[in-house]
Amino acid sequence: MDTNTGRIVLPAVTTEANDFLSTFRQGEIIDIDSLGIHTLDREENQAHAVGFRARLWNLGRWLGLNGRTTDDTASREDLSRIPTPLGAVVLSQTCDIVQSDRLTVQLAPVVRLEGERANQAGSGRRPQYVAIPNANDGLFADLERICTMHKNDIVGMMHRPGVNTPLEGRKLAQAIGRRFTRFPFPDNLHPWLRPLEEVLQKKASKTASPEGRVLEHVIEIRIEAEGKWETPEPYNLTVIVVVEQGTLPYGLGDQVPEQSSTLSTWLRTDGGDLRRPAADIASRIEGTTTSPADKYYLWLALAEAWAEKCKPHAGASAEELAAVSSLEGEVVSADELTMDRWWGSEALDLDHLSPPRPL
């Protein structure tokens, strides 16, 4: 330990470790029993490590880790580590892994998810969990519990690539980065966005549901604010439903036929308001006899229907109710979403919303 700065001085990366890690890439899966504190000079840093484990006591309780015993010291020792029976994933960028002047790497435990939670994570709507292409189905990296490990301690461990292609590697890097770059939506928007979030939670990956099936064509749902979030409340919001290329029968610049009177009568009231819920609209989009023009207008209506769900539940405060002045829906093909609109909007994720901070 450097007595002047109080910092632990980490040893240099050995030649053996540098050679061992030379083939590693971001996403590498390591067979390791647990993650946690890795004291590098146990005699020199014993006092520091004990104190650090003591500070991790409450953290360990929050993580819900097992290992408590009647001996308080033993309990704290156990709680300073995260069990990883399924291994761990290297999160560090590849350039940091292979360069010898980078002394450590960051790892996250591999966890198994099931049911709806796995479906949501697999579709990218829970940024806490990152799908690992080269792992078994249902296995994800848990970014809620990231640990740092010295490269010298990894030497000799069994490992395998987590990605197989450059495209998979790019998608993995984007998923990892997304966890730390998400926009903190203003607290007063929580009751407005929560109803739409509930739709995603209930319908995503449920192929027995018409909404679930059409959601398979949705890449992202983004929230756009007039003024790119620089304008203060109340906000003028647009719910942008970004769909896969080819989902919409017509694109920008195409001559779109007028909406048929049959569809207009089925879809809207005489005043132009939607008369059909999102589930009915989604079901008609899937109809085998639905014309390309009708399908196009039905997608527009579906985005509108989802946007209409963004209304605060009973009990919202006056400040929350006044946070939005207008809200509309729009569907955009991924290949036609401009960079300007992408920068001015933020993805709606199932993990991003948290209740307003207590006063």
Image (cartoon, rainbow, N blue to C red):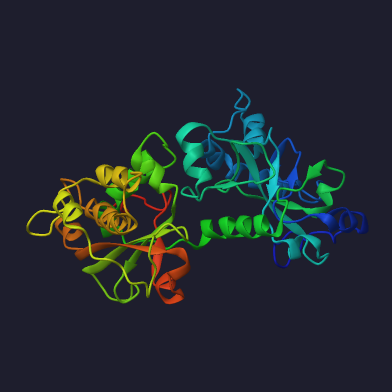
Picture residue at 16% right of the left edge, 49% below the top? 266
Residue 219, percent from left and from top:
46, 55
Q: Is 116 on the left or on the right of 358, as rendered?
A: right
Tag count: 0
Residue drawn at 73 percent across, 35 percent down: 33
Q: Residue furthest right?
A: 15
Displayed quadrant of residue 79: top right
Q: Nearer the viewer, residue 324 or 240?
A: 240
Of 283 and 212, the residue lying toward us? 283
Task: Give the vertical position of 241 relative to 80 (above or below).
Answer: below
Q: Quadrant of the N terminus?
A: bottom right
Q: Position of residue 117 (x, y in %)?
A: 47, 37
Q: Position of residue 37 (x, y in %)?
A: 70, 45
Question: Which residue: 27% across, 47% down?
Answer: 281
**Frontmost residue, 145 versus 122:** 122
- The answer to whether residue 274 is seen in the rendering is yes
Q: In this rendering, would 187 be left or right of 249?
A: left
Residue 235 drawn above or below residue 202: below
Q: Is residue 180 left or right of residue 147?
A: left
Classify residue 205 by image quadrant.
top left
Q: Is residue 215 above or below residue 249?
A: above
Q: Nearer the viewer, residue 272 or 60?
A: 272
